[in-house]
Image (cartoon, coloured by chain):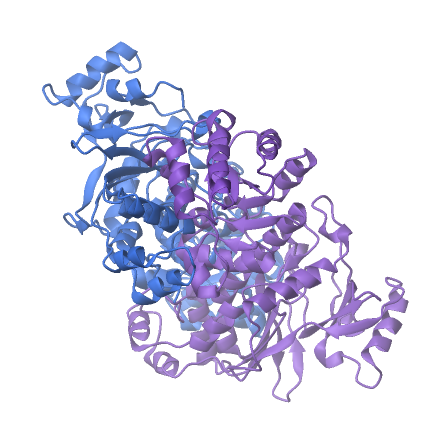
Chain colours: A blue, B purple
């Protein structure tokens, strides 16, 4: 059984370590781990948090059924006392996280997991696996949406994703990041994402002629026909045949939805196709483009005047082609002492970039007058000002640091999702998550969103955090 | 339900197309599709076929349960006649394929699917999804194994893979390609792959001191302790503490298994660590290295004299970092006419590289005297010589082309796996697949396996195929 992933979906060392904590009697000490990344993917100015739904689902299902414990027994590494202990093991901790679709910046916790040390430790690999990938793809989709402007983007990447679940997660994350629809029917069914499709070369090739293939399709899908025109000769046969069938459809009161260019010089072909279509009175026929597209290629094609209405993006989106992994990590940041106080923990590395920020943190996002985020302010949660309003404390602190002159409001970004292992409130639905992404990315400064040398978003540290941050990270 | 993927795990156009075939009465014509790629991944000289097991499993389970047909009904695209037809839809075709672990070269079919047009068409996306990714990772693992020489390679990539199934498939494919073990416990359990692990920074950080963390671990795992030495200061505290505990273990008759370097100058640190370990009488302690390793980095580290015994490879393996998608495609290559003859079909594209080779093909691999593959010879299956031995026919043909002087033997590479939707014979087990990969990659010329400008393996076409291959591809 490979699905859905259970407690054995973990690096072996998670299990050997928690047996260690168990033996040392440390396993039920309360710990706090934070999941964060150290650099924005794609050399960009931001990332878009995603994957929380699946992460919480994993935590809710966490247990070690008999057959899993039986497998572990056979490894020769685990004692019977520990294996018995695992029998009733569940995730009973707290999760605070950025809602999916929220822009997030380096070093900020995407997710904070608090609870017994063993429960928090054993889920490390699974949480990273889920959050890293979906955040990466949601971010890529947001960049593509930025490049495509108001144009529609369809996600077509299933055939090049990392296996079935890679494709499913990619379709979901791509929708969060701004794709309008997916070609993946199962994702449509599981997540309620709109599905779209055109047709394939094999449809054309299975018919005696291209013209016949188009006619058959038009007959069958009078309202959903998008003809693939590059099977034989785009301008020599594909577009003329599409126009001929498009006019036949028109005479029957139907509208050809579009043509799709999948190879060749997309800019040139689309300009010529547009012109011939328009001359034939088919101004309403949309031009779809596909074939190894990403945000850079779309930006370039648009600069070159490409007449493309809908962009089909696949491989380079679902594999996050130019930066195919998010450098997310999950680090112990504090342990609660017997007296109930949080003791910050940190890793100091030979490599400066691999050190961690200690303490259990909260992120305050500071907004300007138009609701636009101007900077973030991170502080150890227990040190958040209680006697004076947070805004005042931040301003005072910021004044000292001379990093930001003013802001209108401040809001905490990490929200409670699990308490004692149970969901707090309702989890947002997918359209709501997508809208959160759309509206909050829209408000980000365009200097952050540019594909080329974006500016760095300010993430400031509060005084308590600064005190711990002695070594630069 | 997302798992396991069912018939809806398809691009929408597969379904709209097969409804089209159904309406035109073409859906039960016998067709042949081939899955192939156009260029070796990673700029390498070969690829390693993988994923067939999951692909066949998908085909065996293919059907449209009531709830899936209900979902499709709601799309407004599918008629009741077609949806009723889907009720008893199963895969009843034939699959011929390269056994997993077999080296494969551009344009050669990894898999050939023959059967009713609709059955062969609707599985396109799923087969590509499964085969593309596993072939990519098996190939990457083989390259890493080549760079690491006799050294052990552990696959640690779960946390950066594309979701749970991406990680599972990657662990399996990495094992096929030559990794000795995985950190992924679920992959260990599901596939019988050996699992290995060390410990994490959080283990060290959860203890008061590094020394205490090592001691606890040694106590618990006297035969499986690998200490992570870079949490605070590799040479200043990590290695000295590891040696201290290693000597304590020695005095109890236990052997410290290893230390792990995860950051910093791996070459320099490993050389110094080796020397201090040896001086302390801990010559048997192995040095593990990890941290963004791939075949290029391993080759460079070994050139620089790194004293590393075991390489932990994660992110760059499971994401195939420098070339994260295989350009595999699945194309209609022939349709059987009413008279039972195969009519080749092809796509001719504006882009030369996107055309396809028509006809239902077989690959003959030509071996030299030491069982080393010297070239492949591809021909339309129905045109394979029957009156004279295949070897003679090939030699005669090759003579004409002056491409190869001689070879000892020739063997067909595509083997029957499914007939009428049912498995023919037994499917090889995973150790058998891995051994197939190991022994057949070993026999490949080292000029093909080099990481830098490998030579191109000769794939020749037989006379019948050449006749169809009028346009260069």
Q: Is residue B437 left or right of residue A97?
A: right
Q: Tell me if residue B100 can be seen.
A: no
Q: Residue furthest left?
A: A387
**B242 or B202, nearer to the observer:** B242
Q: Position of residue B456 (x, y in %)?
A: 76, 54
**A220 or A89, nearer to the observer:** A89
Residue B398 occupies quadrant: bottom right
Q: State the quadrant of the N terminus of chain B.
A: bottom left
Q: Position of residue B396 (x, y in %)?
A: 88, 73
Q: Position of residue B414 (x, y in %)?
A: 66, 73
Residue B16 occupies quadrant: bottom left
Q: State the quadrant of the C terminus of chain B.
A: bottom right
Q: Is residue B441 left or right of residue A415?
A: right
Query: So how many labels did they put on this image?
Result: 0
Q: Is residue B164 above or below residue B242?
A: below
Q: Position of residue A376 (x, y in %)?
A: 28, 26
Picture residue at 35% right of the left edge, 29% below the top: A346
**B245 or B21, nearer to the observer:** B245
Q: Tell me if residue A255 can be seen.
A: yes
Q: Is residue A316 above or below residue B340?
A: above
Q: Is residue B18 left or right of residue B456?
A: left
Q: Is residue B86 left or right of residue B251?
A: left
Q: Is residue A228 above or below residue A433?
A: below
Q: Residue furthest bottom?
A: B339
Q: Is residue A176 above or below residue B437?
A: above
**B196 or B111, nearer to the observer:** B196
Picture residue at 28% right of the left edge, 57% below the top: A86
């Amino acid at each position: 059984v490979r699905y859905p992933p259970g407690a054995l979906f973990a690096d072996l060392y998670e299990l050997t370590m928690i047996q260690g904590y168990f033996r040392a009697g440390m396993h039920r000490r309360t710990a706090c781990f934070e999941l964060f990344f150290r650099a924005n993917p794609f050399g960009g100015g931001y990332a878009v948090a995603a994957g929380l739904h699946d992460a919480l689902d994993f935590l809710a299902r966490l247990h070690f059924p008999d057959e899993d414990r039986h497998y572990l027994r056979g490894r020769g590494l685990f004692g019977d006392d520990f294996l018995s202990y695992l029998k009733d093991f569940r995730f009973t901790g707290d999760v605070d996280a950025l809602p999916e679709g929220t822009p997030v910046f380096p070093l900020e916790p995407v997710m904070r997991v608090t609870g017994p040390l063993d429960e928090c430790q054993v889920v490390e690999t699974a949480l990273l696996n889920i959050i890293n990938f979906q955040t990466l793809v949601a971010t890529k989709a947001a960049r593509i949406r930025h490049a495509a402007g108001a144009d529609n983007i369809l996600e077509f990447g299933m055939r090049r994703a990392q296996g079935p679940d890679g494709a499913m997660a990619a379709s979901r994350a791509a929708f969060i990041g701004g794709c309008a629809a997916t070609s993946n029917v199962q994702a449509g069914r599981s997540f309620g994402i709109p599905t779209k499709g055109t047709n394939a070369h094999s449809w054309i090739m299975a018919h005696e002629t291209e013209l016949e293939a188009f006619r058959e399709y038009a007959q069958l899908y009078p309202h959903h026909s998008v003809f693939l025109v590059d099977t034989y000769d785009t301008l020599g046969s594909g577009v003329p045949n599409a126009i001929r069938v498009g006019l036949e459809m028109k005479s029957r009161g139907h509208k050809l939805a579009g043509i799709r260019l999948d190879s060749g010089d997309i800019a040139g072909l689309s300009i010529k196709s547009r012109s011939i279509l328009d001359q034939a009175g088919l101004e309403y026929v949309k031009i779809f483009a596909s074939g190894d597209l990403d945000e850079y290629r779309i930006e370039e094609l648009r600069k070159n005047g490409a007449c493309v209405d809908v962009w089909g993006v696949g491989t380079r989106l679902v594999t996050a082609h130019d930066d195919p992994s998010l450098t997310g990590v999950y680090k112990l940041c504090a342990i609660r002492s017997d007296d109930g106080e949080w003791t910050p923990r940190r890793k100091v590395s030979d490599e400066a970039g691999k050190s961690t920020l200690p303490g259990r943190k909260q992120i305050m996002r500071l907004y300007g007058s138009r609701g636009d985020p101007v900077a973030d302010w991170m502080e150890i949660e227990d040190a958040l000002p209680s006697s004076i309003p947070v805004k005042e404390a931040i301003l005072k602190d910021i004044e000292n640091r001379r990093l930001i002159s003013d802001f209108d409001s401040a809001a905490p970004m990490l929200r409670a999702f699990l308490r004692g292992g149970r969901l707090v409130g309702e989890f947002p639905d997918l359209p709501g998550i997508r809208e959160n992404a759309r509206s909050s990315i829209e408000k980000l400064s365009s200097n952050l969103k540019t594909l080329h040398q974006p500016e760095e978003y300010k993430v400031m540290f509060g005084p308590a955090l600064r005190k711990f941050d002695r070594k630069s990270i």
